[in-house]
Image (tube, rainbow, N blue to C red):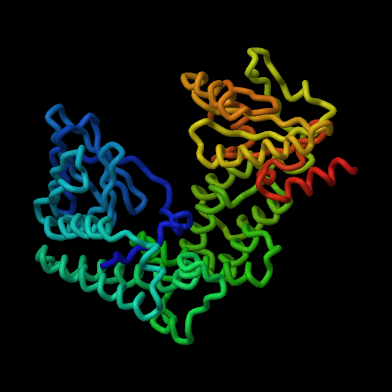
Amino acid sequence: MVNILINPFMKYFILSLVAIVIVSCATENKQHTIVSGTLTNNSKDIVAVNGHGEAYELKVDKEGNFKDTLNISANGYYYFFAGRERTTIYLEKGKTLNVTVNTDEFDETINYSGDLANENNYLAAKYLYNEANRDMQSLYAKEEAQFKNALSSSSKSYDSILSANNVTNTAFLELEKDDIRYAEAGNILNYETYHKYATKNDSFKVSEGFYSSVKDLNYKDTLAYKNSEVYRGLVATHLNTIISKKQEEDSTANYSVTFVETVNDEYANGTIKDNVLTNYLSGYGLRPDEHLEKIYSTYISTNPTKENLEKVNKRYNVLKDITPGKISPEFSFENIDGSTTSLKDLSGNYVYIDVWATWCGPCIAEIPSLKQVEKDYHGQPVKFVSISIDNEKDKQKWKAMIEEKDLQGIQLFADNNWESKFVQDYGIQGIPRFILIDKKGHIVSADAPRPSNPELRTKLDTLLKS
């Protein structure tokens, strides 16, 4: 049996709802929802309930008990948080829900009582079923008929879990049936792309009629988008399918430009367009390159909400100062030998910077390529600088790895890890991150190719010939 879930690779696109407002209510009436419970092995003094643009904090006493009255805006799915653990719950106005859980075995022990016990015990059982059957590689490796049979089998399993938990709530059943349908549709839309990956057959194409069951789906249902994370995932999958086809037709097209143009063409101004673009552009969608202004101006033209505009502006205001040709932010960090090295010290050379950390797997994976590039450009006016953003307490690990890996170039240790001014000025949200600066301290690329990417050598050769 297999679960029907939006593929984990797609979570990059799965888009959350608007800004959160912290709310706590103390009075009760028939339209308010009472959430209570008991945590064992708990070390936190609050639990939280989030959803539909709202967030509630519930105080936990010394015995692990909590209870509060929530003035929720809508019936539907919410998230319940206890420390780092999270699970989906279902709430309705005027109903009660009691949660008991051992936080050491969160998913395995969570249990519900109260008016909404059946609905939520179903969700808990469904989650465990999904976890036990999360083999996406096997699912997408199946041939078309087997694949669709597996999806159908999982739908029947969900029906059995609903029956086992005596779920008769019509409103909940309608929501859940829709979510199961959306998830199945998402898997069908993903099939061609991920079957290629699972079978290592890049030429694979689905048969005619494969998409017949999803061709009439409505990807513009604003209410479903607000209420259902699975539907938001389906919208993301739908958009990714369109964008992937455009990228196949023109592999040189900038992905972010294509993404923004596609969303702009597919959706009228409103909730879906606003949230899809905001979540993408406030994250990794905006890049400090020659496309920044075009993408930003397109976003502004969609009339985003004030809250969403603030999110994107926060990112944009950092990136606009690190586009090609701008003066690079400065750094002055401790060298491996205990001295201090600044960017000004390297004036007169091209500077290739690697921002990394000892705990970062992808960073470590680039080391062999970086060492080879350093060797190949030895004697050229190019300085290779590696800046670690490890925590201060891990400085010895940093020194040990430099020796263990025989790291070359200039090895520096940032003064305040992620909070270092240099890291903040470059808007670095993930590592490894590579930066290329010219001889006069101007930015060539604030997001330069990795050492393993042949484009780096092309760029360096062009600079050295100029």
Q: Is residue 15 visible?
A: yes
Furthest toward the top, the residue is: 338
Position of residue 307 in the picture relative to residue 144 (left or right): right
* Side of 340 where 424 appears, left or right: left
Residue at position x 62%, y 57% in the image: 256
Left or right relative to 114: residue 231: right
Q: Residue 377's image quarter?
A: top right
Q: Quadrant of residue 116?
A: bottom left
Front residue of this view, candidates 304 and 466: 466
x, y percent for residue 91? 21, 55
Q: Pick out the residue farthest to the bottom.
A: 208
Horizontal and vertical percent for residue 244? 57, 68
Residue depicted at x 67% and y 59%: 254
Q: Nearer the viewer, residue 4 or 318?
A: 4
Q: Residue at x 14, y 50 (%)?
A: 97
Residue at (64%, 35%) from the top-left corner? 354
